[in-house]
């Protein structure tokens, strides 16, 4: 049975979906959800600019920086990844792999990757 979304697809979109991998389809869905939340695609985030991003947390690690704890979360929005870093934190309730969130802050480039330090964030309820 076709869902409402499937009925709105053009023939070209249906063919592309038929031959797309699961990862590609998941990435496309993540991008659409991020757009709905008013987020900028990570791949479009410029260095030294404020941005709002949204996506799924892939990994969470604790990386000491200059002797102080730092919690790092890799956020994937379907277009690219961005690292969120909370300095001085070992753990934040709700920040865990698989969790969807929206974050904002100043984007910088560190070691060739996009990073937002001490971002403001909002956990997204599942199903949204």
Image (cartoon, rainbow, N blue to C red):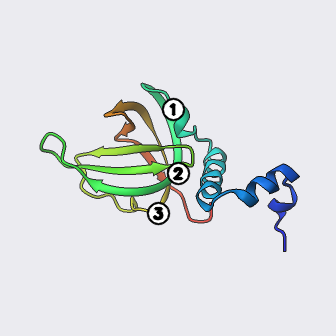
The x, y position of residue 59, in whole percent, is 38, 57
- Mark 2–mark 1 CB contact (< 8 Å): no
The x, y position of residue 52, in whole percent, is 52, 39
In primary-sequence order, the first of circles 2 and 1 is 1
On the rendered structure, is 66 left or right of 51?
left
Q: Secondary structure at mark 3?
A: loop
Q: Which residue is mark 3?
A: 98
Q: Secondary structure at mark 2?
A: strand
Is disc 1 surrounded by few (<14), some (14 to 19) or many (20+) residues within 10 Å?
some
Q: Secondary structure at mark 1?
A: loop
The x, y position of residue 95, in whole percent, is 39, 58
Can residue 10 be seen at all in this image of the molecule?
Answer: no
The x, y position of residue 49, in whole percent, is 46, 26
- Residue at image position (55%, 62%) is 125
Q: Which residue is mark 1?
A: 45
The residues tagged by marks 3 and 2 sit, at their Cα atoms, a distance apart of 10 Å
What is the residue that sits farthest to the left in this orientation? 67
Can residue 43 be seen at all in this image of the molecule?
Answer: yes
Q: Which residue is mark 2?
A: 55
Q: Which of these two is toward me, 94 or 57? A: 57
């Amino acid at each position: 049975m076709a869902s409402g979304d499937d009925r709105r697809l053009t023939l070209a979109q249906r063919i592309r979906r038929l031959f797309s991998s699961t990862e590609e389809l998941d990435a496309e869905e993540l991008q659409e959800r991020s757009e709905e939340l008013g987020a900028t695609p990570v791949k479009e985030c410029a260095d030294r600019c404020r941005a709002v991003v949204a996506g799924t947390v892939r990994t969470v690690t604790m990386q000491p920086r200059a002797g102080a704890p730092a919690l790092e979360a890799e956020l994937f929005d379907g277009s690219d990844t961005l690292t969120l870093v909370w300095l001085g934190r070992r753990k934040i309730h709700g920040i865990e792999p698989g969790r969807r969130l929206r974050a904002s802050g100043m984007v910088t480039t560190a070691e060739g990757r996009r990073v937002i330090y001490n971002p403001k964030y909002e956990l997204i309820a599942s199903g949204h």
